[in-house]
Image (spheres, rainbow, N blue to C red):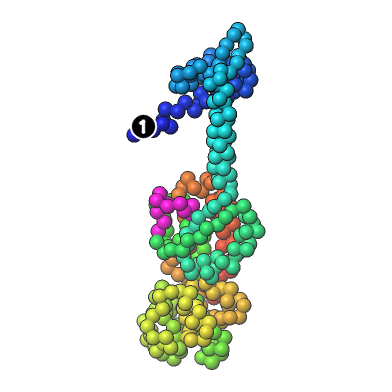
Amino acid sequence: METAYDRLPLNALRVFEAVATRLNFAEAAEALHVTPAAVSQQVKTLEDYLQTPLFRRSGRRVELTVEGADLLPRVRRGLDELEAAMQAAKQQRESGVLNVSMLSSFLQKWFTPRIGELRAAIPDIDLHIHTSREAVDFSRSDFHAAIRMGKGPYPGMHAELLLVEWLVAVASPALFAKHGVISCEDDLSRHPVLHGVDETWAEFLAQDVAPGPAPLRGMIDDSVSVVSAATEGLGYAITRWSLVARDVAAGRLALAAPIARKFRFAYYFVCPESYILLPKVAKFRDWIRSEALRHPLPPHAA
């Protein structure tokens, strides 16, 4: 369906402004890097579109008609607004809002403690974070990138392995002092344990084990809640190393088993192929990749 914009002679308006500013077709042509004939043709196109003359020509002398003089300031305002819009669009490539999707657990335990460093490193990016487990439909949303946990690859996407994940057993220092180390041969009934949905004891121990009684009956379907329960001394827990590395380093949790298992999933930086060419997306990717490289491996990683 045709709109008024489809017929609007934008190039002719730019030429009109150049001629009206200089009142000289040859000088306008030189400024626009076109021929005087091309300038004359564009002015004629605009006059035909408006059905009114815009210039009076007397030899080499050029004057604006009343209609041309009335149109000029309005065209200048419009061109100024267009230029401002173009500059804003260019600026948005470098800075401004950056919409990123990631897991809530990753945001809370790994990313949030690093936000201050991100702001210092890339102060011109206004980061907006959305938490979700679902795959991002970039064609139907305004997201620029996503941090996803999966196995890769992501067909049709630019995807980079960001962080290999590990499973570890943790407990509060007091509970660990009371019950000691869990070994791979242990029957879990000998220890108070917490059961999470996403990271399981069976996957960590890699064998069939008796589940044992748990202070919190049933399963906890949120990884951060499992970590919180372990920190409160409610039981031993299996969790992802990315979620507890800082807690272990700070002494809030103790590693409760002499092994770390590589998790079946890893973290990936994902975005459309064309988006990685945006400077602000590339800057964010470079920053988070450098942070991931600094993330320590767990002790006893196997």
Q: Residue furthest left?
A: 1
Q: How far from the left and from the top, in percent, is residue 5?
A: 43, 32
Question: Which of the two residues, 263 or 72, is positioned nearer the viewer here?
Answer: 72
Magenta-colored stretch includes residue 143: yes
Q: Is residue 293 at least partly visible in the picture?
A: no
Name the kind of residue labelled 1 in the image: Glu
Residue at 55 percent of width and 65 percent of height: 111
The residue that mark 1 highlights is 2
Question: Which of the two residues, 60 or 107, is positioned nearer the viewer here?
Answer: 60
Residue at 57 percent of width and 76 percent of height: 247
Q: Residue furthest front?
A: 66
Q: Residue furthest top?
A: 59
Question: Which of the two residues, 21 or 181, is positioned nearer the viewer here?
Answer: 21
Q: Is residue 232 at least partly visible in the picture?
A: yes
Give the extent of the magenta segment: 135-145
Q: How far from the left and from the top, in percent, is residue 282?
A: 55, 50
Quarter of the figure with residue 185: bottom left
Residue at 39 percent of width and 51 percent of height: 140
- Mark 1 surroundings within 10 Å by alpha-carbon count, few (fewer than 14), some (14 through 19), many (20 or more): few
Q: Is residue 268 left or right of residue 77?
A: left
Q: How far from the left and from the top, in percent, is residue 87?
A: 58, 40
Magenta-colored stretch includes residue 92: no
Name the quarter where the N terminus is drawn: top left
Residue at 50 percent of width and 82 percent of height: 230
Chief secondary structure of the magenta portion: loop
In the structure shown, which secondary structural element does the residue marked by tag 1 occupy?
loop
